[in-house]
Image (cartoon, rainbow, N blue to C red):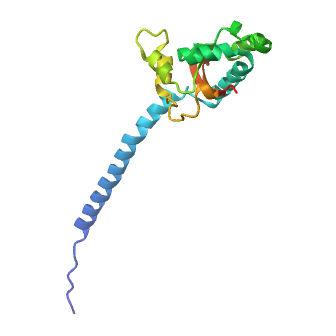
Amino acid sequence: MKNKKVLNSRGFILVETLIVGVFIMGIFSLLYANFFPLIGEYERYKNYDTVEAIYVAHWARMIAIKGLPNSIYNTVENNGYLDITDCSLYTESNKEADCSAYKTMNNISKIYLTPYSTSVFKDYVRRDDSPFTRSFKEYIAYLPTYSKNTSKTPATGYYRVIVEYISNDTYKYGTIEVYKG
C-alpha cells in the first residue's frame, strides 16, 4: 500500500473566495461611484429639452417665423436676445391671436429669441443683476453656446427660440433653431 499525502485545500479555497469577493466589491464600488452621479444629473436636467419641451418650442418657432416682423430680428441681432412673450409683437399674418392661444394652452411664461449662438445671451443671464429666475439661469448655463457652427448666424437667417413653460407645477425649458430665410 502506498501512502498518499493529501493536501489540505481549505486554505486555498478561503484565499480564493476572499480575492474574488474583494474583486466583486471593487466592481460594485466603481459602479456605485459612477452611476449615482448620473442619476443626480438626470434628476437635475429632466425638465430640460424633453420631447414635450421641444414640441412646445417648435410651435413658438412657427409663430415667430410667420408672425414677427423683420425689424424684431434686427433688434435681436443688435441686442443679443429679445423677450417675444408679448403677443402684440406678432403683427404679421394676424398671428397675435395664435400667440395668445398658444401661450394659454401651454402655460407659457417666457419666450426668448436669440441669435443662433447663445453666448451673448448666456453672458447677460449669468450677471448678478439680470432679472431671470435661478432655474432659468441654470437652464441657460446647461445650454451649449452653439458657437462652433459659424455658418449659422443672424446674417444667414438663423436664430434660436427658448421657451419657459409650466407643466405639473414645474418650470420646464426647451430650445429650437429658427431659420428666417
In this rendering, position of residue 154 left or right of residue 96? left
Q: Nearer the viewer, residue 60 or 93?
A: 93
In this rendering, position of residue 144 left or right of residue 82? left
Name the spot of residue 24 as percent of width and height, x first: 35, 53
Q: Note whether residue 39 is visible.
A: yes
Q: Nearer the viewer, residue 128 or 6?
A: 128
Residue at the (61%, 26%) spot, across then down:
155
Residue at the (68%, 20%) spot, across then down:
60
Name the spot of residue 32 as percent of width and height, x first: 38, 42
Q: Note whether residue 170 is visible.
A: no
Q: Give above or below for 78 relative to 23.
A: above
Name the spot of residue 15 as percent of width and height, x first: 25, 62
- Residue at the bottom extreme? 1
Name the spot of residue 166 as percent of width and height, x first: 61, 16
> Which quadrant is home to the C terminus?
top right
Q: Give above or below for 102 relative to 144.
A: above
In this rendering, position of residue 49 left or right of residue 40? right
